[in-house]
Amino acid sequence: MSDKKYLDYEHLVTFSDTNSYGNVYFSKYIDLQGTVREKFLYDNLPGIVEELNSGNFFVTEFAHIDYKNEAILFDTIVVRMTIIDLSRTRIEFQFDYFNKKTNVLLAQGKQAVVWVNAQHRPALMPDELYDKVVGYFGEG
């Protein structure tokens, strides 16, 4: 593990997360990226709803996952999110997925989001948002 600051999120695998073979369906890992990212916003930026209601929001530029090992029903997946690049308009995240019980690396992913205005054009993130990201994770 690196010295970077990160946010850990735990997810218990349920039947709705698995495919017919009993392992976690590949798209769940992408879902978890959004969940962890949004949990950070919810926990750290109570004013984010006003920004979103005014038409400003994040657009996903890309999302990627490299699968390493399987997770199965009732495993607990720890998703570790950190920032690898940050500007006033864009955030690139890294996600590492671990089995909580065995600490086996399940997957690694990246995702970049761009802050856009109501006209869907890249815009500067609100100062409060940018400052919270820098304060929590550092500058990437």
Image (tube, grey):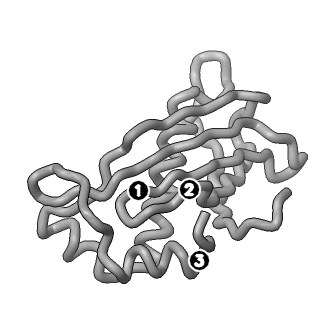
Q: Residue at x 61, y 55 (%)?
A: 84
Judging by the rendered image, the residue that carries numbered circle 1 is 90
Residue contact between numbered discs 1 and 3, judged by CB atoms under 8 Å: no
- How many numbered marks appear? 3
Question: Helix, strand, or loop for circle 3?
Answer: helix
Residue contact at pointers 2 and 1, CB within 8 angstroms? yes
The answer to whether 91 appears left or right of 70 in the picture is left
Q: Distance between the residues labelled 1 and 3?
A: 16 Å
Q: Please name the amino acid that badge 3 sits on.
A: Tyr
**Residue 17: horizontal and vertical position, in percent?**
55, 35
Question: Which numbered marker is on residue 85?
Answer: 2
Quarter of the image where one finds residue 138: bottom right
Which of the marked residues, 3 or 2, is nearer the chain's N terminus? Answer: 2
Q: What numbered label is drawn on residue 136?
A: 3
Looking at the picture, tell me which residue is in the foreground, 71 or 98. Answer: 98
Q: Give SS at disc 1.
A: strand
Q: Which residue lies furthest to the top in this view?
A: 21
- How far apart are labels 3 and 2 at the CA level? 14 Å
Q: In which quarter of the image is the C terminus?
A: bottom right
What residue is at 38 percent from the left and 40 percent from the top?
Answer: 61
* Residue 90 appears left or right of 103: left
Check the picture and name the quadrant holding the N terminus.
Answer: bottom right
Q: In which quarter of the image is residue 134?
A: bottom right
Lower position in the chain sequence, tag 2 or tag 1: 2
Indicate the position of residue 4 as horizontal and vertical percent values: 74, 66
